[in-house]
Amino acid sequence: MRTRRVLRQRGLPDHRRSLERELNGPTGRGPDGGGPAADAANAADASGGAEAQFLRLLLRDAPAVEYERPLLQARARGASPAELADLEDAKVLALRVRTVLSDRRRRESELTALFETANDLAGMRDLDRVLRAIVDRARNLLGTDTAYLTLRDTVLENGDTVMRVTSGSVSARFQQLRLGPGEGLGGLVAQTALPYVTANYFTDTRFQHTATIDAGVLDEGLVAILGVPLQLNGRVIGVLFAANRRERPFSHAEVALLGSLATHASIAIDSANLIEGTRAALEELNAVNQRLTDHSGAVERAAEAHDRLTDLVLRGGGVEEVEAAVSAVLGGAATVHDASVHGALPADPAVAEAVRASQASGRAAPTGTGWAAAVMAGGEPLGAVVLEGVDLDPADQRILERAAMVIALLLVMRRSASEAENRVRGDLLDAVLDTPARDPDGLRRRAERLGADLDAEHVVVVAEAPGARPGRLRAAAMHLAETSGGLAGTRAGATVLVLPGPEPAATARRAVAALAAAVNTEVTAGAGGPTAGLATFAARFAEARRCLRALVALGRIGEVATSADLGFLGLLLGGDRDVAGFVDAALGPLIDYDARRDTALVETLRAYFDSGGSLAKAKDVLHVHVNTVAQRLERVGRLIGPDWQEPARALELQLALRLHTLLAGGVTEDGGTGRARP
């Protein structure tokens, strides 16, 4: 055709010049617009006018429908068939050029997008972010409803690919799919390492359909699917998909585009995996280094603890020094629970449970706020070492267990020494109670060696605790005597304590409280004292023992009493028979008041009791008005307390009145003469 020949004969410059003439108007005319030059130009325009019209359409990227306008205009003005044929050829050629230019622009846009994608992926270090960016970019580039990506299962290594990330998906079932080799379109892509495209997934028989995969695809509503392999070093590591929820084919250009994206994606995934692997290796290396550092620190602490504890044992240190050493080496607050002093188990239930667990396992056990290790000697529980306020790793737990072993050694050594000393204390107590006059100076020297002063005032306590384990009360009493500068022993089945102090009741109550805490049961005790020299210890012991027997007989288990606490029973049981003291304790305020005011309160109280508590009979005995008797008794209540008419108090007062009468008549406890206060 002539148009094709013209286009072939004319180069691009000819077309450009023709286009410029069309845009800028005719040139080269003479002053009159005619002549040979004008004829030549008109001929050129006639031969190239059709091409110029279509070039102008190409230049402004006109829609394809506008390429029909020159033909329509030529037909309208009655153009010849040859001219119409030339215009048709020029239109077809122009449309082809338009298509090529459009494809090139699209390819340029795709290449730009791929370059931007590669640049974005190169800056990502996290694998999940890389995968998310890949599917989002695939969906945007191809304009599909969804995009998703599966990766090889590197755990099972069975060839399966599992759904890793999706974009535009709405089905949870679809998002959890696993594709075996050859199963579904994705399984076929992974198996063959070739891209596959289907315009309608459910009617395509080229791949193996499974109920699980088909149900997931149906739940997502997908119809057209394109899948391309993700390859690395010739090995398929996954599949990249783009899919629509309507039936439509994917062009070769779209397949190539998704394949190019998959190539970049494979490199990015590999880079992210390498970075994650490097990061994991670095973290593992740091963890190993930290473990080595911790182990080195633990070894150093163990060595320090060994040196401290060994030195402590060699120089005869005590349990308190072990507490300080453990606290210094391990931190926290260490305390030693001595079973012989504080009972079998600590009072805190959580700590007690941890000690039981340690006794059973032979290892340190957690308390919830720290750790505890049982102190054992040949299967016998001696106590525990408790460390609060710190958590221990296995190496530090071994240090605590070694400290418990050292404490066991110290306690056994201390118990052996204590037992020897206790035998000495017991022997000295027996000598003081049985033969104080045989060698008083020798007894004093022996007591001084034990830290006791027999010439000072002492209180003798006799105690029983039937509910205690055999020997526990005696051991607790020995410890109390050792720490208090006293004596302890066992006589007639009862535990005897001799403790320094002037107040029998207060000293006895403190002692019994300590004993009860140690044996974890009720302790009943009688007390006598204070002593006044060696010769009085035996009498105070007898007094304390009688008080204990009275308490047991009265059923007052778990109580402490002295002769004074027992009232007239104290008078009957007391060793010194202090009748005047008893009378003074009961009637002293009344006797003093009568002596100062020249009244008769004691006589009125005696008449009242003798009259059976009758005011009328008492006034006859006293020869006074009944109101006077009432007023005197009111005064009595104010002086000796409002409870004076209670049965027990009334009995003591009547006994005191009888003894007062005897003392006033000149009869004393030894049968001689004497006189009490009037």
Image: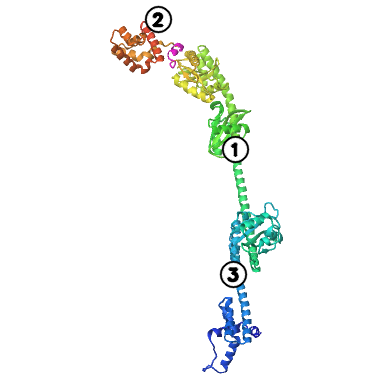
Q: Earlier in the sequence, mark 1 or mark 3?
A: 3
Q: Amino acid at mark 3?
A: Ser
- Judging by the rendered image, the residue that carries numbered circle 1 is 397
Res 412 seen here: yes
Q: Position of residue 107 (x, y in %)?
A: 61, 70
- Judging by the rendered image, the residue that carries numbered circle 2 is 672
- Up the image or down, 208 lies above or below 493; here it is below
Q: Nearer the viewer, residue 541 or 430?
A: 541
Q: Position of residue 83 (x, y in %)?
A: 62, 86
Q: Nearer the viewer, residue 57 or 607?
A: 57
User: Which residue does the image show at 60% across and 33% down from the upper left?
Assistant: 357
Q: Amino acid at mark 1?
A: Gln
Q: Which residues are magenta?
A: 564-575
- Judging by the rendered image, the residue that carries numbered circle 3 is 109
Q: CA distance from mark 1 to mark 2?
A: 77 Å
Q: Quadrant of the C terminus?
A: top left
- Up the image or down, 364 lies above or below 153; here it is above
Q: CA distance from mark 1 to mark 3?
A: 67 Å
Q: Is residue 247 left or right of residue 436?
A: right
Q: Is residue 619 left or right of residue 466?
A: left
Mark 3 secondary-structure assignment? helix
Q: Quadrant of the N terminus?
A: bottom right
The crowding category of the residue bearing disc 2, from other C-alpha atoms within 10 Å (few below 14, some 14 to 19, many at least 20), is few
The crowding category of the residue bearing disc 1, from other C-alpha atoms within 10 Å (few below 14, some 14 to 19, many at least 20), is many
Mark 2 secondary-structure assignment? loop
User: Which residue does the image show at 66% across and 57% down from the upper left?
Assistant: 214
Q: Earlier in the sequence, mark 2 or mark 3?
A: 3
Figure disc tally: 3
Q: Amino acid at mark 2?
A: Gly
Q: Position of residue 421 (x, y in %)?
A: 56, 21
Q: Position of residue 246 (x, y in %)?
A: 62, 63
Q: Earlier in the sequence, mark 1 or mark 2?
A: 1
